[in-house]
Image (cartoon, grey):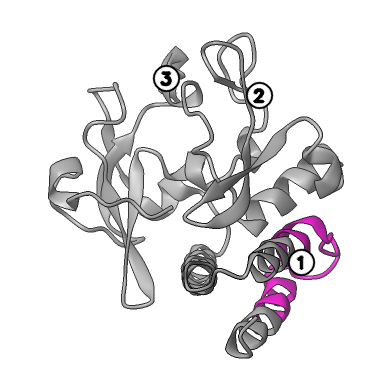
Amino acid sequence: MNREVDINEISDGRLYELNDMVKADCHDCQGCFECCQGMGDTVVLDPLDVYRLSVHLNKEPEKLLENELALGVFDGNILPHLRMEGKDERCIFLSREGRCSIHSARPGFCRLFPLGRYYENNSFKYFLQIHECPKTNRSKIKVRKWIDMPDARRYDRFVADWHYFLRDVQEVLYGTEDTVLIKNLNLYVVNRFYLKPYEKNVDFYDQFYERLKEGKGLLSLGA
């Protein structure tokens, strides 16, 4: 999601890359789960997040929308997010012991925290959010290790490409009053990038970029 805030007000004033050290290590959180509740619909998922959850839970994406995930509107785009439960809005994957039950397949939003992404020039850099995490004894850790994603540079490229594609979709949505076009474009993004299963024995990124090329082609034709 786009955040209209001054980065200097929410960060330590630095931008980080994958091999930089950042004071983000919460030492396995040690019983704290503040960032796993009260999040509303803000834990927005990208196509890789949904794919990993689908594989981890052995559920088709459409089945995930019946319980674990929900759809919401973010910057004009309809996208899936983690479902929260109860008055405390606890993440549906938070165990009674306050631990993440899908930690190995947790979404990028969760892997990132308390880092954020600052997008510019068709890419992004990381920044440290200074007001979000209640832990005060965090240690320095390499950004790459904190994110904990295989082939981190390829993952970063995917994140940037997906972000800027959604920006292009948003421009189309905000630039028209054609309700049929708005509906069809949103349905296309959800169905093509999220609900249509990715083959598990084929590289995810290769499949994603095939779909992205198709999506960009549709946008160039006016969707």
- Mark 2 near mark 1, Cβ–Cβ under 8 Å? no
The C terminus appears in which quarter of the rendering?
bottom right
- Most foreground residue, 180 or 201: 180
Q: Position of residue 166 (x, y in %)?
A: 53, 67
Q: Which residue is mark 2?
A: 92
Q: Residue at x 60, y 12 (%)?
A: 86
* Mark before the other along the chain sequence, 2 or 1: 2
* Mark before the other along the chain sequence, 1 or 3: 3
Prevailing SS of the magenta stretch: helix
Does residue 96 sit above or below 60 in this rendering?
above
Helix, strand or loop at disc 3?
helix
Q: Position of residue 3 (x, y in %)?
A: 32, 51
Q: Badge 2, how many Cα within 10 Å: few under 14, some, many 20+? A: some
Q: Residue at x 69, y 62 (%)?
A: 183
Quarter of image, res 53: top right
Say the numbered circle drawn on residue 192: 1
Residue 60 falls left or right of residue 77: right
Which residues lie in the magenta part?
190-212
Separation (CA) of disc 1 from disc 3: 34 Å
Q: Which residue is mark 3?
A: 34
Q: Badge 3, how many Cα within 10 Å: few under 14, some, many 20+? A: some
Does residue 188 sit above or below 59 in this rendering?
below
Q: Residue at x 45, y 26 (%)?
A: 28
Residue 81 located within the stretch drawn in magenta? no
Mark 2 vs mark 1: give the one in front: 1
Instruction: Kindly identify the amino acid type of the residue bearing the numbered disc 3.
Output: Glu
Residue 203 falls left or right of residue 49: right
Residue 131 falls left or right of residue 160: left
Say the numbered circle drawn on residue 108: none
- Most foreground residue, 212 or 145: 212
* Mark before the other along the chain sequence, 2 or 3: 3
